Image (cartoon, grey):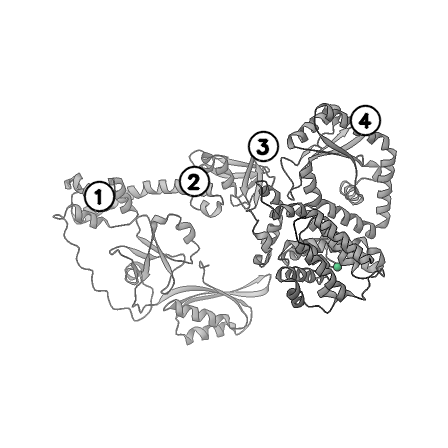
Amino acid sequence: MSVLDRELQGVLTAFREARPNDDSSLIEKAYHYAAKFHAGQLRASGEPYLSHPLAVARILADMRMDVVSVTTGILHDVVEDTVVTSADVQKVFGDEIARCVDGVTKLSKIDFFSAEDRQAESYRKMLLAMVNDIRVIMVKLADRLHNMRTLGALSPERRERIAKETLEIYAPISHRLGMGKVRGELEDLAFRHLDPEAFQEISTAIESQRAANEDYLVRMRQTVVDELKKEGIPARVEGRVKRAFSVYQKLKRQKISLDQVYDLLAMRIITDSVKNCYGALGIIHNEWRPVPGRIKDFIAIPRPNLYQSLHTSVVGIDGKHCEIQIRTEEMHRIAEEGIAAHWKYKEGKRGVQDDQRIAWLRQLVEWQQDMRDPSEFSSTLKLDLYPEEVYCFTPKGRVIVLPAGSSPIDFAYAVHSEVGNTCVGAKVNSRIVPLRYAIRNGEIVDILTQPGHVPSKDWLSIAKTSRARNKIKHFINASERERAIEIGQKFLEKEARRLGVSLSRIAKADLERVAAEYGAAKMEDLYAALGYGKFSARQVLQKAAPDQVVEAPPPPVPPPAPTTAGPRSGREADDAIIRVRGVEDIMVYRAKCCNPIKGDPIVGYVTRGKGIAVHSKSCTNVTNLMYDSERRIDVEWERNVGDSFPVKIIVQTDDRPGLLHQLTTILAAENANVRSLEAKTNFEDRGEGATIEMTVDVRDRKQLDKLCSAMRRISGVRDVERPHHT
Ligand code: MN
């Protein structure tokens, strides 16, 4: 058996051990395929090239990854380094593996070199965004890990370059994915190549401390083992050697020298349950005095990558400091393997804890949201994504869990509806913040309230949680109804006065009959409906006292359309061009915010006592207005309208002579009257430019669209938009 065959056997054994029920034949097939095409190629070390993909596959199998990942590991360099194309891989191994191999190939082509610190984060984001399957990252990390282990054979320049990239890009990614073990190894390997002296010095110090304190650690360990046993807490207790790079970072962070680092000595206790973790912590603290400020409870509040453990530092035997971590087996595995530990669960049935377990994916999603095309993100991962959450605190330390992007208003309503209703401001970590502020993990939020203060409608565009939104809506609906009743009553009185009808002479029973006719159970409901403008006061009076109110005269014939498209006094004109489906005799006006024109899809909203406001469906205000579906009403454009509508258009352009002329030429060619035009130069990130604001008369949406696209075609025009339309 050749060396390579033996390596293959190692991969297969590891894979079958981790996944006894999975078919491993693809792995063998990939081996023979890769062997054929990598034949004759050598690594820098002189070994056959194939030993590298096999080692990568072995790392993946040891991580208990699935057959797609391991097979991709074997094939990961065939497209990059041989004549094989990605179409070939697809034909032989199918879509899924071809996609993964493609993903790894794509990543290999990015040049991260000389990424400054500031840019490294963008690179990491970009790398993740380029990936459509998280397994691609796993293969890439395994690839990088093996390359780092065998870095010695390369030239010093390449060594430095790869080590730097590892430290800046790949180690942080493995950290985000919770893969403590891979991260640790990547960092130490990179550190060793980038700063051999410091690495040596620290490694030697750690080793000598460990040797010098062998006896101390044995005694500490024995005490812990005995005490836990006495209390019946089952546990594995191990001495822990700190990693060189993490010590190095600590020295840098705290600006101290090596002899000032006390806790190179560390122990880890692994037990069976959360309860016993805290039990063990109690026993430790009973035995030795804890160092203040060093107790950390990552069980109650896991790190974003889902790391969980209890940390403490104690003044141990002979007054020497010792750092102790306490965790369950489960937490241990997740701390070491991260996403890979999760992977195993994905295959089987999902447990309730999965919700928690994949919390670190939130971080990924967050990165994802910054990217151009979030749809590119992992199809595999997508299924499992949960809305991201933030954990924050009340000043008294109560934990409040909210969806990401939540505001102090959401927080206030989560505490209590009364706190929400009377909220006037908020402090985050003792600093005043605007109500629009997006709360972040770990922040302490203090809500400022004022008795008698009431929620505002604007809050609906800020609040993220349905709890807060519902409470605000409820409050606004209730208070609006009160006002509508008041207004409705006044309407009726006013109309009665105008028609010379004495309300007091209309029998209460008659009014109640009319109310019933309109489907209102009580007089209050009738007033409210009047206040909301659902029907007119005149109609009500007519029905209640037909003998006193004469039939409304037929509507006057509309005057001929004005010959010039001058400004029209809104209401009568709007009445004539927009019809409310199924209802006549109702006030209609076009909303000022979006100023809908003929041809725009429109929607009506019953206002308080002002009739129907007609908005364009794309109006930015519509979503918030329409929360009350009862007040939404169908409206449509009348068919024959020869009028024109003034429309505001904003054009962003380069600051180039002649451009304005081109714009007005287009308008003239379309016979569109320009009412006003104002050009301003501005400076922005895209360089010097101009903003041209104009109001133009157009016949309808069709003409407007035509104008806009003609303007967009002018070279130097960056954007043409109609304000308030999304
Ligand atoms: Mn490789």
Residue 275 position, x and y percent, is 64, 30
Which residue is tagged 1?
A: 516
Residues at badges 1 and 4 in contact (C-beta under 8 Å)?
no
N-term mark: 4 or 3: 4
Taking depth in this image into account, of 551 and 280 the one nearest to the observer is 280
Q: Is residue 648 above or below residue 382?
A: below
Residue type highlighted by circle 3 = Gly
Residue 563 position, x and y percent, is 30, 71
N-term mark: 1 or 4: 4
Label 4, secondary structure: give it. helix
Picture disc at residue 397: 3
Residues at badges 1 and 2 in contact (C-beta under 8 Å)?
no
Q: Residues within 10 Å of mark 3 (few under 14, many from 20)?
A: few
Residue type highlighted by circle 4 = Ile
Q: Is residue 617 left or right of residue 50?
A: left
Which residue is tagged 4?
A: 317
